Structure formats: C-alpha cells, structure tokens
Amino acid sequence: MSNAARRVLIVEDEMLIAILLEDMLSELGYEVAAIASRVDTALPLIDTLTFDLAILDVNLAGESSFPVADALARKGRPYLFATGYGREGIISEHAHRPVLVKPFSSRDLRFAIRSAFHD
C-alpha cells in the first residue's frame, strides 16, 4: 500500500499541533481522515471512520488518551503516541508502541509511522 492510500486519524487537543501534523502528513503523502480533540469524539471514529493509523497525543486537555489506545489495540489498528512527556509518559500496556516526542520533525514523524506499521 502506498502512502497516498493511507489515511491517518489525529487525536490532538492543540489545534496548532494538529495543523502542523496535518501539513507534515500531507508532505509525506498521507491523508488526514479526521482530527479529534477529545476522547469522547475519538472513540466513535474508531468504529465509523476508515483510517490506517492513529496518532494520539497522550494528554487531551487533562484527559488521558489511553482509552482510545485501548480501543485501537483491541481492533488491531496501528497507532503511535505524540507527546511532550516522552516514553516515560506511556503506561505499560502501551509501552511497546512508537512514541513521537514533541517537538518533532518531519523525519521523526516518518520514522515513527514506519515503526507503527511494522510493530
């Protein structure tokens, strides 16, 4: 599957970061399927939206995105975390998932995506 065929769900509460991610993904040949800024808006998208990968901010306005990660894991959907907390901010159930540390470059994003698809 080429990058152009791959769609990404972004779960991020800071719109500037979401827009930056959207621009970087577009430059890498990916399409953004949707942007969700809260757990309660992201969870229904897992069942209703067509996407190949999810990028999750760990902290969504004080709420953990781990319920979204749990739902993605149950469905066998690839995902990665984008966080300023680094790997230390990831709970043990998801510690094996790729972590994109903020701030990040396009190269960092490309590497994290590759890791998510090969995990």
Image (spheres, grey):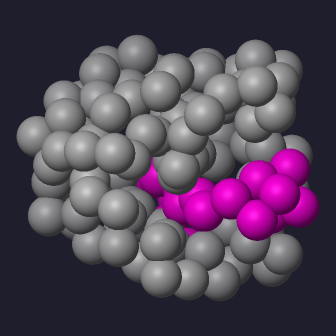
Q: Give coordinates of residue 36: x percent, y percent.
A: 60, 21
In this orientation, which residue lies closer to the viewer: 43 or 95?
A: 43
Residue 30 in sight here:
yes
Q: How many marks?
A: 0
Q: Residue at x 11, y 40 (%)?
A: 27
In this orientation, which residue lies closer to the viewer: 64 or 42?
A: 42
Q: Quadrant of the C terminus?
A: bottom right
Q: Is residue 99 above or below residue 82?
A: below
Q: Quadrant of the N terminus?
A: bottom left
In this orientation, which residue lies closer to the viewer: 7 or 105?
A: 7
- Magenta segment range? 71-87
Locate residue 84 relative to residue 76 in the image: left or right.
left
Q: Give coordinates of residue 10: x percent, y percent.
A: 50, 34
Q: Is residue 59 above or below residue 70?
A: above
Locate residue 67 relative to residue 5 in the image: left or right.
right
In this orientation, which residue lies closer to the viewer: 51 or 10?
A: 51
